[in-house]
Structures are given as structure tokens and as C-alpha cells.
Amino acid sequence: VTHAKPIIIEDLETDERQLNHNRNNSTFVAKSLLGVPLIYKGKVIGVLEAINKRIGKFSIEDQELLLILGSQAAVAIQNARFFAQSDLISEFVHELRTPLASLNTAANLLLKNDINSNKKNALVEVIQQETSRLSSLATAFLDISRLESGRSQFQFQNIGLSGLLNECVCLMQTQADQAGLSLKLFLPKSNPIFRGDPNKLKQAIINLLSNAIKYNRPNGEIVLNTQIENNTLRLRIIDNGIGIPQDHIDQLFTKYYRVPGSDQVAQGTGLGLVIVKRIIEGHGGDITVSSQPGEGTIFTITLPLIPE
Ligand SMILES: Nc1ncnc2c1ncn2[C@@H]1O[C@H](COP(=O)(O)OP(=O)(O)O)[C@@H](O)[C@H]1O
Ligand SMILES: [Mg+2]
């Protein structure tokens, strides 16, 4: 179907393409299948499937009917996505207002002749901070809009777990050292190879490690812990930093949300966790958080280890 052609499979059990492996977490059993591509402007944006015809086999007529339905569905889906995108853009523009206003104020103050050099330096620092904030916002916004519009395709390939996690820790080690924090990685005895997008997974894990570093305390600790059970990987990012009050936990994965007071602790956009969640869900996994203010935070990623 990814090649924009319909497909009929009469017996999924024996089909070597193993299209059933994605469904094994439900009790539903698919026997026969008719799939048609959802095409919008010549691009495949999804698949519409009919499963288990009650009487007889899927026919060419069935296929024609589903193709017509599919072409309508593709337009409807794309329209819904455009709507979602316009919401995304208006939220983004709204978020731009605060840093832009600060920049404007700082620039106006700098233009006055009667300011001393201390004040001048402070204003230049404001300009530096706000421009770096704008640049992070722009990068994160692009990531999210690509993930949400489906334009960012996941590049699935075989990944070795140890290699992936070692790389993440390596990349964040300097930052942890500079903040005076210890960063430890505990790998499982086995090194499972699984299917995933290594760059996206790296981005997700680095985002979480970067939070664990930013919202920590002097001499704090960060642990990246792994556990494998029944082809499921449980990855825990544990810190003993400032923690998150219970009544803010629910909103952590909301766009632009930052726990009040975070501005004083570290710079941020409130988009990191949204990106992380999208990436993990794109791998069929999920992410949860538990935290104790003043004691620390644990983010837990659960990821099905899709075999090679
Ligand atoms: N490990 C953590 N410890 C304490 N607070 C955290 C942690 N991770 C995230 N947070 C809180 O969740 C908010 C959202 O995180 P995130 O989406 O990564 O945005 P950002 O880090 O850019 O502010 C942060 O602003 C912070 O208030
Ligand atoms: Mg963050």
C-alpha cells in the first residue's frame, strides 16, 4: 500500500509480510484484509483497511468501493490536519509576543543616552537570552509541526540498545559535568536489537536528560535505567532534582506549559516533553511521570521492542 497500490490478503496467518505483528496487543484476530492507500496530492498519507469479510473473499468491487471511500477520507484527514496546523501557528505566534516585547523594550532603553555601563550590559544580556529563546522556540515549533502534520516520517532501522543509550549519555556528559551532576547509565545484560528511528529516539532521550540536568540541584544525580520484560523496554530517567508538584503533572505534556517558577531555574520553551511524547508514541510506546517535589522526578518510557 505504501507504493500507492491496493492490497488483498486472503490469509494473514500464513502471509510472509506478517502484517499482524502490530496488532498482537489486542485480542482481535485479523484473518483476511483489504487495504487501500489514502492518497492526497499524489502522496500516500495513510492506509484504510477492511478486515475479515464475513462472507466470501474480498473482491475487486470491494476494492473499488474502498478506494472511493479512501479518496474522500484522505481529503477529510488532510483538512483536519490543516485546521490543527492553523491552531498550532496561532499558538506559536502568541508565544512569540513575550520575547519580542522584551527585545523591543531592551532596544529602546539602550537607545537612551543616560544609562550606565552596568545597565547596558544587563540589557544586552536580556537581548541575548530572548534571541536564544526565540531560536529554541522556532526549532521546537518546526519539530512539532513536522511530527503533527505527518510530514516527519520515521526512518525505522535496526538499533542496538546499548549503542543508542551510550551515545545519549556521551552527548550529555559535558553538560552534566558543568552543572556538577553525576550521570549514570545502567544497561541490561543483553543488548537487544530492535526497530526504531535512532535519531528521533536519541532526540527524545536527550530531551529528558537535558530536563534532568536543568531542573536539578547542586551535586545531584541522574540515572538512566533500563529493564526488559516480555519484549518491552522500560527506560527510566531518574533525577533527584527539584521535582514537580502533583497538581502540575497532568499539564506537563501540554504545549508551552512550564511549571510556574521554571523560568527562574532554567531557560525553556515548554515544548520538549510534547516532542518526546510524540516520538515515543510514534514507536508504539508511552511515557509516564512520577515526582516528589524537593526529592526528584522519574520519567518512564515503555517501548515495545519490535524485532529485526
Ligand atoms: N526532570 C524534571 N524535574 C523537574 N521539572 C521538570 C523536569 N522535566 C520537566 N520539568 C517541568 O516540565 C516543564 C516542561 O518541560 P519541557 O517540555 O521539557 O519544557 P522546557 O524544559 O523547555 O521548559 C518544565 O518547564 C519544568 O517545569
Ligand atoms: Mg525541556
Image: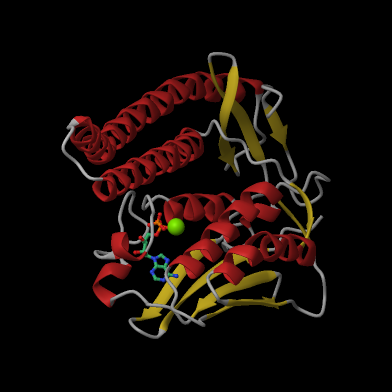
Residue projecting furthest to the top: 41
Identify whether 90 is placed above or below 268: above
Q: At which x and y percent is residue 64?
A: 58, 19
Q: Looking at the image, which is closer to me, 262 or 40?
A: 262
Image x and y of residue 281, in percent: 53, 54
Q: Quadrant of residue 106?
A: top left
Q: Position of residue 210 (x, y in %)?
A: 52, 62
- Spot the residue most to the bottom: 295
Q: For the N terminus, give its image quadrant.
A: top right
Which residue: 60% across, 26% down?
37
* Quarter of image, res 244: bottom left
Residue at image location 44% in from the left, 26% down from the top = 73
**Quick one: 6 or 308, which is closer to the camera?**
308
Colour convention of the picture = secondary structure
Residue 251 at least partly seen = no
In depth, the one of 42 and 178 nearer the eye is 178
Name the quarter where the C terminus is drawn: bottom right
Examine the rendered structure and indicate whether residue 33 appears above or below residue 79. below
Report if residue 87 is visible in the image.
yes
The picture quadrant for ligand 2 comes to bottom left
Residue 272: x and y, percent? 45, 53
